[in-house]
Amino acid sequence: MPVNVAREIVALRKMTVGQLRARYTEVFGETTNAGNRDWLVKRIAWRLQANAEGDLSERARRRAAELANDADLRLSPPQPRGQTSPSPHVRVLSLPIDQERLPPPGSVITRVYKGEMLQVRVLDDAFEFEGERYRSLSAVAKAATGQHLNGLAFFRIGKEVAS
């Protein structure tokens, strides 16, 4: 890093947030409302270094664009922080087993898993697997595989399976 860039970066660390915002405007050509001092120092230092030593190569820019295209986008907003319990005005209901997708009580759901036939009996309010009762198909799938899985998906319920 050239000496003058290093000096400028040292000087950035001594600036106030207002001075950093002004420097940001000089370096980037646009204003910012950022109030995080560390972030401003890092961004300005990056731009100063990029101007002095050269920006990303065209190949690096293309690769970054490819990675950005392949990135998963969040489709729902994050949950509010600090809410560990429901609001006193919200009632949490215990929902019954989804009767539309599940076979009726008394039915047996079967699935071959690792060469072994798994059989689950549907009860009125639970599921029976290897003599044990489970509250959900997901719990049965976890007991059978050791992994947390969606029970409906594991037992292929509710989807047409092409043969």
Image: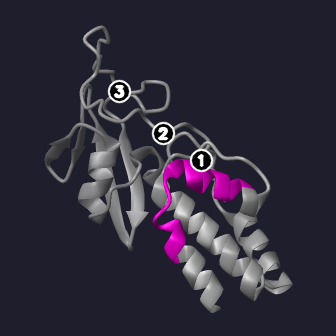
Which residue is found at the position 50% from the left and 76% from the top?
Answer: 10
Label 1 environment density (alpha carbons within 10 Å; few <14, some 14–19, many ≥20): few
Q: Nearer the viewer, residue 1 or 147?
A: 1
| Label 2 sits on residue | 78
For discs 1 and 3, the disc positioned in front in the rendered view:
1
Q: Is residue 126 left or right of residue 16?
A: left
| Label 1 sits on residue | 74
| Label 3 sits on residue | 97
Q: Is residue 132 left or right of residue 142?
A: left
What is the quadrant of the N terminus in the image?
A: bottom right
The residue segment tinted magenta is 10-25
Spot occupied by residue 75 in the image (x, y as percentages of width and height): 62, 42
Residue type, mark 3 in image = Ile
Which residue is found at the position 23% from the left and 57% from the top?
Answer: 143
Which residue is found at the position 71% from the left and 65% from the top?
Answer: 68
Residue 108 badge: none
Q: Is residue 24 left or right of residue 17?
A: right
Q: Is residue 138 magenta?
A: no
Q: Are marks 1 and 2 in contact (CB under 8 Å)?
A: yes
Distance between the Cα atoms at labels 1 and 3?
29 Å
Distance between the Cα atoms at labels 2 and 3?
28 Å
